[in-house]
Amino acid sequence: MNRPAAVAHRGRRERSRTANWRRRAPAIAAAAGILLLWQAIVSGFGVPTYIAPTPIQVLQVFVEQGDVLWINFWPTLMEAASGFLVGNTVAAVLAVWFVHSQLAERAFYPIAVFVNTIPIIAVAPILVLLLGNGYAPKIVIAALICFFPTLVNMVRGLKAVSPQMVELMRVLSASGREVLFKVRLQSSLPFLFAALKIASTTCVIGAIVGEWIGSNYGLGSLIIEATYNFRAPLLYATVVLGAGMAVAAFAIVSFVERRVLRWKPPEVF
Amino acid sequence: MRDLAVRFETDTGLVTALDGVGFDVPVGGLVTMLGPSGCGKSTLLRAVADLVPIGDGEIRVFGRSPEDARLARDFAFVFQDATLLPWRSAIDNVRLPLEVGRRDGGVEQHAEPDELLALVGLAGREAALPHELSGGMRQRVSIARALVCRPRVLLMDEPFGALDEITRDKLNEELLRIWRETGTTIIFVTHSIPEATFLGQKCLVLSAHPGRVRQYVDIDFGGPRTLAIRDTLEFVEVTAHLRGLLEEST
């Protein structure tokens, strides 16, 4: 790269950084405003700490009880991540099967819909009875919550191949496997990532809900414990940490999506 | 010489797209197919490409059935839509036919993808993704892809129908050049009378309900075809004749 080009490139990057700031500034200012207002209301009206802590007290928990938070953070992260992996993998494999076998789709799709309609909070105790008190039921709950959106989206994505593309592959005498690997899987990726973004946040919810039902570790159990003991600042800090985990997971999936999907989705054509 | 013959003979059934159609395409020729919508010209082309089954009658592509011709890659198809894989670069889209559907594993004679992109006027755009190309350029890529297996027949189903007129004129000229340079037989379906006249050495005019051959017209301007011939009297006479045939048949 020659010099003027390098300078121009840097200039462009700086400009886009300023533009980024300008775009994000309102959200940051609004969040800061809400925190300030919260702090002012709680201390101004003298609300007791066990009912509502101030943002500063919540922050103090992170500093003083950081070890408790971290010890409970890892199991939840592990359960959420495993559930994400298991749920989405099973959903993707089933979707491929459904697209290739109408019989399978007719037989199992209604069952998948039925399972999805059962509230996860009602399934959780059943799974604890079945699988005991360890990691297993939490992973299954996190997986279940990821499963359905991915299944639906993936089936749609695999079918979202234009009739002309199907005809083209037929003119080329392509086998079903070639159509799957060269066309369908790739064209389903935008749909898959849309589902993975949903799953990245719901898998954390699944893990936490799983921990509510009989568990003595993890963010979910910490939430229950802090509530029963009126340790409001700890409760809030745990919630913030759980939300942070979900946001981070979402950001990772979005990052991977930008890396993988460099082409425009098919509706452009 | 009868190397590509299409015969449809049907007299039963409620809906018959084509009835008693018969015509031959000369080797190395460029035949355009013109007809009112619903006359079955697309169906006819799809039948040649083994995309729709034929009832009675027969289609022979260089003496083979459409299915055998498909497996032997005797023909390639260009759709109205470029039908490119949006995640593949131009050159990788051209390579697609070399990667799929070759169960025998034999080494086929094929053209070089980069030379084909140069042939269709896209040298230097090999790495471009479809969304970075204009509609006309995407259709050029799809023509290059169709040529990669050196097909003996190129079947084109209104390939320029979705393009603006200026782009369409340009691609018509280029298609003639490509046809001369490759020597491929082309069957070109269109609903544009000037396009059918400009491109075709022969024009098959079909009538609708049921689809029949109205007339198989020879078109000869005795000289190289450039866009300018479309303003000559001879050209206008041919288009007027074709239009007359179409109006009678509806």
Image (cartoon, coloured by chain):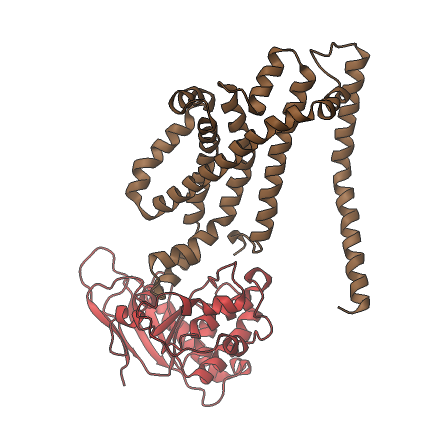
Q: Tell me if residue A139 comes above or below residue A3 in the rendering.
A: above
Is any part of residue B37 visible from this angle?
A: no
User: Given the current orientation, which residue lies at the most extreme bottom position?
Assistant: B222
Front-lying residue, A235 or B29: A235
Q: Which corner quadrant of the image does residue B146 belong to?
A: bottom left
Q: Is residue A9 above or below residue B190?
A: above
Which residue shows up at 49% across the image and 18% down it? A214
Answer above or below: position of A46 versus B104.
above
Figure quadrant of the N terminus of chain B: bottom left
Quarter holding residue A87: top left
Q: What hue does chain B carry in this figure?
A: red
Pick the residue in front: B58 or A110: A110
Q: Nearer the viewer, residue B29 or B124?
A: B124
Query: What residue is at 81 percent from the left and 62 percent from the top?
Result: A7
Compared across the picture, whether A65 is left or right of A190 comes to right
Q: Position of residue B202 (x, y in %)?
A: 37, 80
Q: Is residue B83 visible?
A: yes
Q: Quadrant of residue B55?
A: bottom left
- Residue B111 screen position, x and y as percent: 44, 78
Residue located 53% across and 70% down the image = B168
The chain coloured brown carries which letter? A
B97 with respect to B69 (left or right): right
Q: Residue at x 43, y 56 (%)?
A: A183
Q: Is residue A237 left or right of residue B81?
A: right
